[in-house]
Amino acid sequence: MDENMNEEEIVEEENESPAEECGAEAEDLSARIEELEERLEASAAECEKNLARAKDLNTMYVRLQADFDNYKKRTSEQMKKERSEGVADVMEKIIPLADVIDKAMSMIADENVKQGVAMVARELENTMSAFGVSEIKALGKPFDPSFHEAILRVPSDKEESGTVIEVFRKGYIMGDKVLRHSVVKVAE
């Protein structure tokens, strides 16, 4: 009989077990759902935090990029300015050479030698021109203290008052910078 009883007990246990198991499973599932909801909320909060951090990093990146672009522009402009100033310094040292060549041209009697010196003068003028240096045209122009230095004022019936009538020393300009003023005689 014990064997029969055991079977009945087993049957009864099997009959009661599913209900109890369902209740236990429901509790486990509820606990699992709560745990998952908590994890979801924590993940959402972390996601919001990461999104805010990403926005901050993006803003920093945009600012750094703008700062870097400004830095490149500034350094490029500074390099151009320094190069221009360097060229101007060198050209200021070369200009007296042009004066010496012009003086030599006026003193040479031999035409062959004069042609050779004229070639050197043209080459020097081409080199200066390549660096943006040009002669200030003064003869016959109105006197302008920005470009000319008057050392004589003479009365003139032929020229209008304030007109340059003679150039003693050529002046040179590079862009908008006067490297050397023209030394001139002006009509009164």
Image (tube, rainbow, N blue to C red):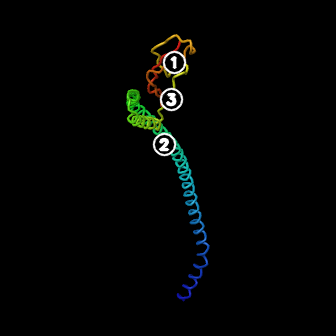
Whether pointer 3 and pointer 2 mark residues with C-beta atoms closer than 8 Å, the reply is no
Q: Residue at x 53, y 51 (%)?
A: 50
Which image quadrant for residue 142? Answer: top right
In three-dimensional space, the C-alpha distance between marks 3 and 2, rounded to whole angstroms, equals 30 Å
Vertical order, 4 against 155 (above or below) = below
Mark linked to residue 68? 2
Query: Which of the marked residues, 2 or 1, is nearer the chain's N terminus?
Result: 2
Q: What is the distance, in whole Å, between disc 1 and disc 3 at their CAs?
A: 24 Å
First of labels 1, 3 by sequence position? 1
Where in the figure is residue 129, as x and y percent of width and height?
Answer: 47, 36
Tell me the element at label 1: strand
- In this rendering, the answer to whether 142 lies above or below 115 is above
What residue would you read off at disc 3? 176
Q: Is residue 65 above or below residue 154?
A: below
**Which residue type does callout 2 highlight?**
Phe
Q: Position of residue 63 (x, y in %)?
A: 52, 42
Q: Amino acid at mark 3?
A: Asp
Which type of secondary structure does the marked residue at label 2 adopt? helix
- Name the residue: 56% across, 88% down: 4
> Which of the two discs, 2 and 1, sits closer to the camera?
1
Query: Badge 1, how many Cα within 10 Å: few under 14, some, many 20+?
Result: many
Q: Which mark is residue 165?
A: 1
Question: Front-most of 174 and 75?
Answer: 174
| Crowding at mark 3 (Cα within 10 Å: few <14, some 14-19, many 20+) | few
Q: CA distance from mark 2 to mark 1?
A: 54 Å
The first of marks 3 and 2 along the sequence is: 2
